[in-house]
Image: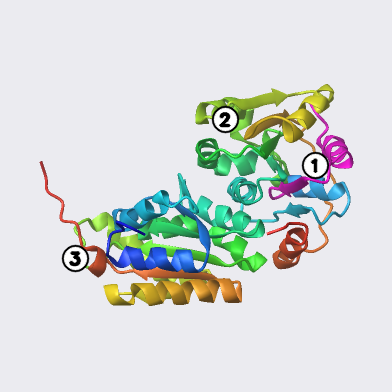
Amino acid sequence: MEGAIKDWRNDIYKVFKELNITMVSHVPDAGHTPLINLCEKDNEIDVVTLTTEQDGVGLSCGAFAGGRKSALLMQSSGVGNCINALALPNICSIPFLTLVSMRGEWGEFVPWQVPMGLGTPKVLEAMDVKVFRADYKEEVGSTVDAAARFAFNTNRSAAVLLSQKMIGAKQFKNG
Amino acid sequence: MIERRPFVQKILKNRQSNLRVVSGLGTSTWDLMSGGDDKANFGFIGAMGQAIPFALGLAMAQPDLKILLFTGDGDTLMSLGSIATVANHPVSNLTIMVMDNESYVETGSQPTATAGKTDLEIVAKGSGIANSYTIKNEKDFDRIIKTIYEEEGPSLVVAKCQAKATPLVFPHSFDGSVSINRFMSTLKS
């Protein structure tokens, strides 16, 4: 924890440690980068870089079957890639936790991010995933804690949408 | 060409107590179940493309066990990127055995990419799984057993099989939560 960045990702990391989440998979997003860095420095956490978000669903379920808790980190654009894979934790009653950094909402610059950003909560709910949302930095820790406990205590899937308001909308510059 | 069902059954018949077996959806699961009901098996009946990442997560969580995945070429082709993930997060205890019949046999035997120009052994090698080879003959049985129990994984074996439909053999339950809980009862967490 020493030298850890004092921001809301640190609050997520604390939840991981408290709930013994020891595997973190991701397709990276800038919004998750500080958290990924914290996890990579931690010898008790295995960080798995995926080629597609859906593989994080299967990975998480296999890890849980083997006795390890995990979380999948992704950007909202990755949620659509996971739809059919979400049948696995659902039908097996395996707890599944994902943290989704939102794009396509607060001050978005790239129009291509908007369709999946708008679709993200609907797609998750359509697959029976309980959707939590954190709009403000102060509520991130408690929201991730609540979502993780929901998932692991009730053997269901839970997602936390981390608002673009907190992450900040990147303004691209040409040239 | 290998006749898949007796080949799978032979592997299961000689299994050691430290082996846990997972199968991808479709024929691979019916093959696995044809070897007899065993709590130490878990068969997918859906979630196509998820068997390889599931097996990776399981192998990472249970490093003292040997994890064997039977899956098809169709299931593997759906998640080719997962082979790269396995290669780059290596687990020494995982053997992926692709029962490659070059067709989607359950849906009317439409040809898969492996019936064309795609070679999954080369895909695996190119992805970084050095221990990858193809077998076309039952005589290679001993090599498979060595790979599963003795060699440093991850390994990916392509077993070229006959593309013929075999009788469906259902698992103990179609309810995934029942199957996974039976399977988990054989694991120490």
Q: Are marks 1 and 3 in contact (CB under 8 Å)?
A: no
Real-space Cα separation, disc 3 to disc 2, in angstroms: 43 Å
Q: Which residues are magenta?
A: B1-27
How many other residues sit within 10 Å of disc 3, few (<14), some (14-19) or many (≥20)? few
Q: Nearer the viewer, mark 3 or mark 2?
A: 2
Which amino acid is tagged 2?
Answer: Ile
Which amino acid is tagged 1?
Answer: Ala
* Residue at numbered disc 1: B165
* A117 or A139: nearer the viewer: A139
- Left or right of A96 on screen, residue A41: left
Real-space Cα separation, disc 1 to disc 3, in angstroms: 55 Å
Label annotation for residue B129 = 2
Asked if A118 appears above or below B102 in the picture, the reply is below
Q: Are marks 3 and 2 on the same chain?
A: no
Quarter where residue B45 is shown: bottom right
* Residue at numbered disc 3: A107
Spot occupied by residue A32 in the image (x, y as percentages of width and height): 34, 57
In what element is the residue under mark 2?
loop
